[in-house]
Amino acid sequence: MALAGAFVLIRRDTRWGLAVTGWLLLPPVLLLAVSHLVTPVYVDRYLFVTAPALALLAAIAVAELPRLAVPAAVALAVGAAALAFPQHLDVRERNGRFEDVPWAIGRMKLEAGDAIVYGQSSLRTGFDYYATNAMPDDVLRLGDAPAADSFGYPERADVSVALRGRDRVWLVWRGAKSADLPQHGRVRQAGFALVRAWHSADIPGLTVALYTRKERR
């Protein structure tokens, strides 16, 4: 139905048609491209931004139908909403975003003085929400609020200095075990080596890794 609406809109006004169709199609294409070329970022909820475009194009398609077909189109829309309702509930579960933060916290068997480093600083939002009293020290954190221009948090730049005097650090990131993010290299340069890593088995999922100082090993 949305594609039919796109064809109708493009026929009537090419610029508006291409703009709304791009609004619908570009977000999934860009997410897939970034996930393939840079880092896993594809999450279903990020496509919610296309919902207004989808509704607009569907409405245009319905407006083109003969009057007798409108009740059938309304029934189709109601049926689609009913089918989508369970997915709206699923996305609000603790792993609805395929980032099971409580699972990640449960994987951390803490010792006194443990530190935590995030592969993507925006993960702090979830860990702050689910955090228990026993959490590793967030040694890179500079403030409680995200940056004004992103979902990330301001962090200390010198990881080696932040980890000075620490023997163990938990590195948490969004993506597979095989991902190699800048923070991985900085933790290794600080004198730490990987002991073990766990992945939540979802895509992109979360990976929790324990690093210990090489001298301790």
Image (cartoon, helix red, strand yellow):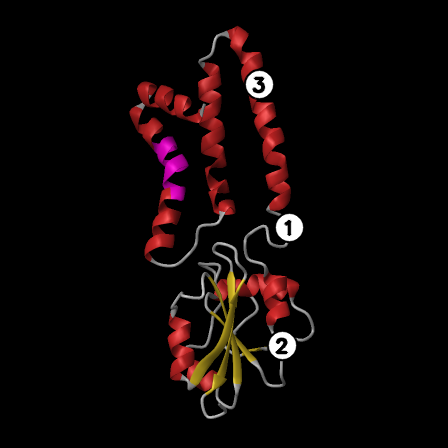
Which residue lies most toward the left here?
14
Asked whether the viewer can see residue 40, the reply is yes
Taking depth in this image into account, of 21 and 92 the one nearest to the observer is: 92
Q: Report which residue position mark 1 lands on.
A: 93
Q: Residue at x 52, y 10 (%)?
A: 69
Q: Which mark is residue 109?
A: 2
Residue 58: percent from left, percent from top: 47, 24
On screen, residue 111 above or below 123: below
User: Between tags 2 and 1, which lies in front?
Assistant: 2
Query: Residue placed at 49% from the left, 59% from the top?
Result: 151
Identify which residue is drawn at 63% across, 30% down: 82
Principal secondary structure, stretch drawn in magenta: helix
What is the CA distance from the residue labelled 2 to the residue labelled 3?
A: 54 Å
Give the Cα separation between the discs numbered 1 and 3.
30 Å
User: Where is mark 3, residue-wise?
Assistant: 74
Tag nearer the camera, 2 or 3 = 2
Quadrant, the N terminus: top left
Query: Which residues fall within the magenta stretch?
Result: 19-28
Q: Is residue 3 left or right of residue 206?
A: left
**Residue located 46% across and 93% down the image:** 215
Q: CA distance from mark 2 to mark 1?
A: 24 Å
Q: At which x and y percent is residue 90?
A: 62, 45
Q: Amino acid at mark 2?
A: Lys
- Does the magenta-highlighted stretch encompass residue 23? yes
In this view, which residue lies farthest toward the right? 133
